[in-house]
């Protein structure tokens, strides 16, 4: 969802993708055999509380905290992003894909 929001946002890109283009990209990614989707499960709220204790999310940081809690719930410890806000969450490793 974050990808769809950013890839189609006219304030982020001079020529953002159309919704159909961005959805097509997601569908291609989800078709890969090693890709799976995640969602909130039984441990989610506890993980979100842990993340909230670390970073005290408010406003625009809330969706980032949501994603980090999902990562932790699903034993994912690394995120590849240029978004520096994720560095506020010490329980994950942040890697810049362009570094």
Image (cartoon, rainbow, N blue to C red):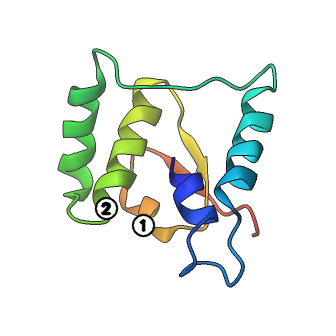
Instruction: Tell whether 11 sits left or right of 52.
Output: right
Q: Position of residue 37 (x, y in %)?
A: 57, 26
Above or below, comparing residue 92 to residue 75 in the picture: below
What secondary structure is found at the residue carrying circle 1? helix
Residue at image mark 1: 85
- Write the residue at 34% across / 44% down: 66
Mark 1 and mark 2 residues within 8 Å of each other at the beta carbon: yes
> Count of labels shown?
2
Residue farthest to the top?
42
Which residue is more in the foreground, 27 or 92? 27
What secondary structure is found at the residue carrying circle 2? helix
Which residue is more in the foreground, 28 or 38? 28
Q: Position of residue 14 (x, y in %)?
A: 68, 85
Which residue is more in the foreground, 12 or 72? 12
Instruction: Tell whether 49 sits left or right of 6.
Output: left
Q: Quadrant of residue 27?
A: top right
Residue at image mark 2: 61
User: Which disc number belongs to residue 40?
Assistant: none
Q: Quadrant of residue 46?
A: top left
- Write the residue at 53% across / 81% down: 11
């Amino acid at each position: 969802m974050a990808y769809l929001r950013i890839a189609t946002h006219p304030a982020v890109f001079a020529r953002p993708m159309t919704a159909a283009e961005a959805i097509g990209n997601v569908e291609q990614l989800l078709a890969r055999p090693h890709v799976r989707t995640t969602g909130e499960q039984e441990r989610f709220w506890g993980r979100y509380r842990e993340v909230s204790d670390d970073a005290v999310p408010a406003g625009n940081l809330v969706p980032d905290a949501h994603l980090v809690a999902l990562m932790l719930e699903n034993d994912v410890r690394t995120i590849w992003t240029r978004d520096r806000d994720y560095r506020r969450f010490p329980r994950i490793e942040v890697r810049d894909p362009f570094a």
